[in-house]
Image (cartoon, rainbow, N blue to C red):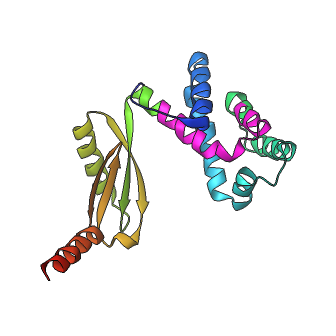
């Protein structure tokens, strides 16, 4: 886990939660609950506003998030963690805390995540081939975080850790345009 570095306030919270979940054998259940909460925040503009807005007091955020957690049946360690975060006026950082927790879980399992940007959705065959190639390259199990961005025109951009491969058509066209300007 030494190679996965989470830092800052969100990293400290995520590390504390991870260590507590590891001690109690609840890593997977906490991750599932946090993933569910993360999806809820992504799908609901009102919930995202509650999480990010400094206008709400700590008590208002705590009451609202407690009701949301109960309705979503998120309790135990994950529920208590989110309530503590709200009580401490750190709810704005919960998305980063969830991402850092997921990174710590992946590191413990020997997994890594590649951020892939494509111009159009990839077929299951292409996803499997890409995943296999990245796993062969890293020697780890690789999960893909795929984003569709039509502005890259074609090809793909893969970011794995500190390495990035930009094989997008947009970048290739820009480099040709730049090379043609130098010739003049």
Residue 162 x %, y %:
34, 43
Depth check, front residue: 65 or 61: 61
Q: Position of residue 130 (x, y in %)?
A: 27, 50
- Report how many numbered discs are placed on residues in the image: 0
Q: Is residue 129 left or right of residue 180?
A: right
Q: Which residue is at the front of the view, 118 or 88? A: 88
Q: Residue at x 39, y 71 (%)?
A: 150
Furthest-bottom residue in view? 184
The image quadrant of residue 15 is: top right
Q: Residue furthest top?
A: 23
Q: Residue 101 falls in which quadrant of the image?
A: top right
Which residues, given as a range, are shown in magenta?
A: 81-104
Quadrant for the N terminus, please.
top left
The residue that appears at 56% across and 20% down in the rendered structure is 22
Chief secondary structure of the magenta portion: helix
Residue 165 position within the rendered picture, expressed as x and y whole percent measured from the top left = 27, 54
Q: Please give the name of the residue rendered at 27% of the width and 44% of the height, measured from the top-left corner.
A: 134
Is 78 drawn above or below residue 72 in the view shown? above
89 falls in the magenta region: yes
């Amino acid at each position: 886990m030494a190679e996965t570095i989470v830092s800052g306030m969100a990293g400290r919270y995520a590390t504390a939660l991870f260590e507590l979940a590891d001690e109690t054998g609840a890593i997977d259940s906490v991750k599932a609950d946090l993933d569910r909460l993360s999806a809820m925040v992504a799908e609901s503009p009102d919930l995202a506003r509650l999480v990010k807005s400094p206008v709400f007091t700590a008590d208002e955020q705590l009451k609202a998030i407690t009701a949301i957690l109960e309705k979503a049946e998120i309790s135990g360690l994950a529920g208590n963690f989110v309530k503590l975060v709200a009580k401490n006026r750190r709810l704005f950082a919960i998305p980063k805390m969830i991402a850092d927790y997921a990174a710590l879980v992946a590191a413990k399992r020997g997994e890594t995540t590649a951020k892939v940007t494509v111009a159009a959705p990839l077929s299951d065959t292409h996803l499997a081939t890409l995943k296999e190639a990245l796993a062969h390259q890293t020697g780890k199990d690789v999960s893909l975080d795929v984003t569709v961005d039509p502005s890259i025109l074609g090809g793909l951009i893969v970011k794995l850790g500190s390495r990035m491969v930009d094989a997008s058509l947009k970048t290739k066209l820009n480099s040709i345009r730049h090379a043609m300007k130098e010739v003049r």
